Amino acid sequence: MIELNHVHKVYRGDWVALNDVSFAIGKGEFAFIVGPSGAGKSTLLRLLYIEERPTNGTVVVVGFDTARIKREEIPLLRRKLGVVFQDVKLLPDRNAYENVAFALEVTGVRRSEVRSRALDALGAVGMRHKWDALPYQLSAGEQQKVALARAIAREPVVLLADEPTGNIDEDGAREIVGLLADINARGTAVVMATHDFSIVEKTSSRVIYLDSGEIRGEERSVGGIGHR
């Protein structure tokens, strides 16, 4: 599903963002990438959806080698991915339903399917009742739920979440992680980057520790994921 082999990422000739990173994530797996700010977590995720390319090494995502992928194939890869950011990137002049529906429309989903898929996705994250709310009318946690709905409406095989709880209080963070666990339980692989070590202490998922661009360790915690 995802495989990194001896990946290096160097910016401006001398800033090493990732140094000899190797790991694999299998189908349907839930993995946390954990580390402090500046550890390289966001860079790593950007390599997975080809916002960046590795300086050296190989990155393979859902069968695509990002070093060899053709430009016209990049949209095909991205359609297999859902991506959620700390900055939710919702369109401010569109309501919750329209934000989710727009993500489907731009990928060519038939108009007859857009409404049902968008509403189903909002329902899956507990936001169907606020389908007509504009982003400014929603709390930070609710906005992140809409962003999650937008990501899963496309039925991705992998969901990438970059600090999705960074702007949310503790209760909201637990709820978001619980929703990610629900999404994972339905078969979607989830990779979540976070600097919040307290989140992973409560999980039973795989945890990959990243610091200064290098993997420092890996384990499975003993708690239960996403208690709400």
Image: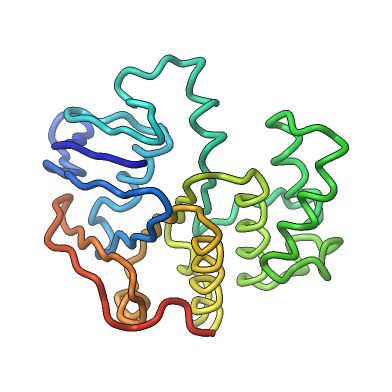
Image quadrant in which the N terminus is located: top left
| Residue 33 sits in quarter | bottom left
Residue 2 horizontal side relative to residue 121, left or right: left
**Camera-side residue: 83 or 133?**
83
The residue shown at (49%, 30%) is 77
Q: How is the image coloured?
A: rainbow
Horizontal arrangement in the rendering, residue 34 relative to residue 175 (left or right): left
| Residue at the (55%, 68%) spot, across then down | 182
Image point (75%, 65%), residue name:
123
Left or right of 163 in this view: 219: left
Indicate whether 34 appears above or below 199. Answer: above
**How far across and down, in percent of the image, does residue 227 sit?**
48, 83
Residue 75 x %, y %: 54, 26
The image position of residue 69, as x and y in percent, is 38, 19
Q: Point out residue 4 in the picture as x, y percentages from the top left corner.
A: 23, 39
Task: State the count of labels.
Answer: 0
Which quadrant is the C terminus positioned in? bottom right
Residue drawn 17% across and 44% down?
A: 22
